Structures are given as C-alpha cells and as structure tokens.
Image (spheres, helix red, strand yellow):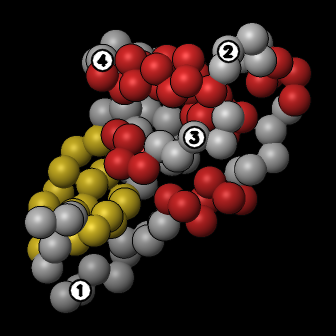
Amino acid sequence: MGSGVTKLLWPSQKSRERGVFKVYDSLIFMKLNKNQAQEKIEEFFSNLENKTPEQVRKIKKLAMTYNIKLKNKRKLFCQECYFTKLKTLGIKNKVKRVRCLNCSRIYRWKAKD
Ligand SMILES: [Zn+2]
C-alpha cells in the first residue's frame, strides 16, 4: 500500500474534541426554532460555492447548538480549517479519499454504494 504518510482523521472524533465552543457565539441563533435552523443549514449547504471557512464554522455551531446532525454534509468541508474546497483523490475498496486544498489534510470516508 505504501501510504504511510497519510494522516488519518475521523471527522466525528475530531468534532467531539472540538465540542467546546463559546456560548455567546451561539446566542445569535437562539431566536430560531429547530426547523428554522434545519432549513438554514440545508440552504447553506445547497450553495456552498462562495462560502467562507468562517461561515462554515458558524453553521456547524448552529447545527451543534440545535443538536442537528450534519451527516453527509460534514463531508463537504474540511473538519480542521472549514475550507470548502476538497479534492477527491480516489475511491478504493469503497473508501473515498479527499484532500483539503487549504491545509492538505487527508480524509477517508466510506463511500456508500
Ligand atoms: Zn483544511
């Protein structure tokens, strides 16, 4: 295989480590109910093209605040720097490898189907 340099990061693990966030940051979202928050998240991810890492970071916090699972949407941005440009390196044995074009971190995600 010879992929010894690959740093394997499981996003779910990483996001748990980062579970602590500043309370006041989440207060701006408090006026939304859960459905509205969900809609906001759906809308955000339906057009990710011109989103900045800061916006991604905020929407992730919004999801966390409302306990909304991002599921596959998590794979649309880098878990480390929230950059939205991820390059697919290839799919092997149903495992998809993508690299963040900003911090060069490599993620491996199980590709379903
Ligand atoms: Zn990154």
- Tell me the tag on residue 32: 2
Disc 1 + disc 2, Cβ < 8 Å: no
Task: Identify the residue position indicated by label 4 in the image.
Answer: 47
- Per the model, the C-alpha gap separating discs 2 and 4 is 21 Å
* Residue 60 occupies quadrant: top right
Amino acid type, residue under disc 1 in the picture: Gly
- Element type at mark 4: loop
Pick whichever of labels 4 and 3 is earlier in the sequence.
4
Amino acid type, residue under disc 2 in the picture: Leu
What residue appears at the point 20 percent right and 65 percent down from the top-left corner?
Answer: 112
Q: Is residue 103 visible?
A: no
Q: Which mark is in front, 4 or 3?
A: 3
Q: Is residue 60 visible?
A: yes
Disc 2 + disc 4, Cβ < 8 Å: no
Residues packed near mark 4 inside 10 Å, few (<14), some (14 to 19) or many (20 plus): few
- In this view of the protein, which residue sits in the foreground, 65 or 102? 65
- Per the model, the C-alpha gap separating discs 1 and 2 is 49 Å
Task: Identify the residue position indicated by label 1 in the image.
Answer: 2
